[in-house]
Image (cartoon, grey):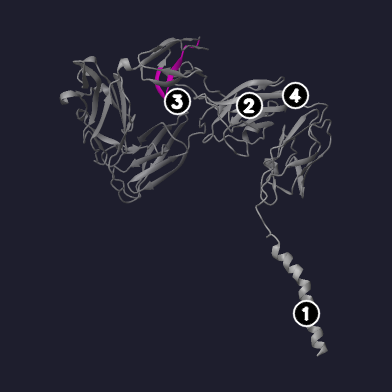
Amino acid sequence: MILRFLVLQLVHFSYLLLLPIISCVAVQDPEGGPPDETPPVLVRSFPEDGALNFKGKTIRFTFSKDIDVENPHHNLLFMPKLTESKNKQPYSYSVNGKTLQLKLNAPLKEDTTYSIHFSKAVKDTHEGTKATAKILTFSTGSFIDPITMKGSIKELLTNRPVSDVSVYLYSAERDPQEWQQAGTPDYYTTADKDGNFAIGCIRLGKYYLRATTGKSNTYKIDYEKDKYGFFKDPIDLNESKEDIVLPLITADVRDLKLLRSTPQKGLFEIILNKPITRYQLIPLQNVGTKGKPQIYSFVSEQSPNVITIYNTFGLLEGDTFKVKLMAKDAMHRALEETIAIRFKEGKIDPTQLSYSLSPQALPSILPDFTASILFSKPIKGFKEDLVYFECKYQEKIPLKQDEWRWNENQTKLTIRKHFTPEEIMQFVTQTEAKDDKIKTIQQMVTLHIEPGACTAFDQTTHTKINQTYLLRKKEETGTISGSIETTTPHFIIELLNQKYECIASIRDKKSYQFTMIPPGSYSMRLLVLNTGEEEWSPGDILKNIEPNPVIFYEKEINVIENWDITGIDFKF
């Protein structure tokens, strides 16, 4: 009995001892909480920022939290570039908690200022947050190199600033082939949102300047996708420069190449590595007793690097037919290949002959009229008498022989028509009565292309094409004029709308005037041409040829009705 009592008392006493512990557990906040996404911050380094006469072979960074490193030999950037031993990285590295240590495998250059950018390489161990963009600068000599280069990045053909652009400097003492193929820049930075950039602590010397919108860690330019800029000659940085303007262009300078060819049911596709602007297919064989056949082919706006050839000469599966392909791209890169075309058994599914009209819609037209109709298939038959302009009382203005033209592959019809004063008098007229007088509001004409005017190779035809155009009235427009002071004989003055599209141009006129311009805001640029060339050249970075100059009139030009704007002058 006494033993049972003692056991019960002991149990009761143990329960009382556990109550405070249970109470503490019950009111404790749960573990966890929001992740710590604050970036690692550099709190200490060896050498210190701004240190002079550094001769060591070990560099250490200590951060505010535990870190990892990500591909440091690409993302940890030394400026200028470290000396590399053969078949060996310029440094080895180790990470211990909050500290990153680098051990150099080659001595630093004497009397040189180095800057180390580590923000892309260092990240938080737990959340992966990249370190803040701190730069460590020190010198192996008695002073920090004082040279600074500042400038801006602009798009050459629009004159607009370009943001988030990588800017690279390469020492002229290096072999250009080395850094063009795979070399790290000696100095680099990124332009801000307004296209401005600055690089400091540069060693005296001459440097090549490059810039690209690409984000590759290889520091290469992707000519297919990137906008890029360059100067053909190195910049002399034996003193600071603060007014550099580097223009960017888009120019795919890769060689034009055949990627592959693919037979399909009823057609054969030739696929190139880049868009083409012109091509020709020359038959090299006879088909049966008919001799060399007409080849019907097509390149669409959606796939300008693909040539589609249609089986219009009855080849069976397994048969081949050789053609010579001659093609050019926008950079005048040429390709010439002999290709054996073949087809899979079967026919392509029939499709309607569709079209697109360019320009799609115009607010008004001038007496000199141009329009193009692009068809979805090559055209075999054309009846020009079914293409005409309709005026009042359903009177027709037919097209003359020299007022229409097909492209080489019979897929695009271009109409160029000059309306005479007599023809304009036939336009449909809308009038209004005011103060017992009849006032002409507008004149219009309608382009008609009747069904059957254009018949594709597979005998399909289009629906009726109608497009009405208003005639531009002189009293509702303005003019822009000026003069060009230059010794350059060849140039093009272009009037641009707010989308930077060229709406009018004048060639080689030192006194010029744009007439009958609708009210609105415009800009103007002057393209300098090379002697003997019909078009402006974007240059060739692979041949170290800069783009031809482009000069903008710096102010916006606002046109109002019945007003002449003068003094829009250029001097170069």
Query: Which dot, 2 or 1, sits closer to the camera?
Result: 1
Hey, what amino acid is under mark 2? Answer: Leu
Q: Nearer the viewer, mark 1 or mark 3?
A: 1
Query: Disc 4 to disc 3, how far (Cα)?
Result: 41 Å
Q: Is residue 76 left or right of residue 520?
A: right
Question: Which residue in the protein does label 3 denote?
Answer: 500
Q: Amino acid at mark 3?
A: Tyr
* Classed neighbour count for the residue bearing mark 1: other residues with Cα under 10 Å, few (<14), some (14–19), many (≥20): few
Q: Give the label on residue 146, or none.
A: 4
Q: Is residue 261 magenta?
A: no
**Mark drawn on residue 46:** none
Quick check: 105 above or below 145?
A: below
Label 3 or label 2, whichever lies nearer to me, is 3
Does residue 325 appear anywhere in the picture?
yes
Q: Which residues are magenta?
A: 487-505
- In the rendered structure, find residue 11 and report the number of the disc placed on it: 1
Q: In the figure, residue 398 lies in which quadrant?
A: top left
- Per the model, the C-alpha gap separating discs 1 and 3 is 90 Å
Query: Which residue is denoted by mark 2 in the rendering?
Result: 209
Separation of residues labelled 3 and 2 (CA atoms): 27 Å
Amino acid under disc 1? Val
Q: Residue at x 49, y 23 (%)?
A: 537
Task: Residue at the far bottom: name it.
Answer: 1
Amino acid type assigned to the residue bearing label 4 in the image:
Pro
Q: Residue at x 65, y 23 (%)?
A: 234
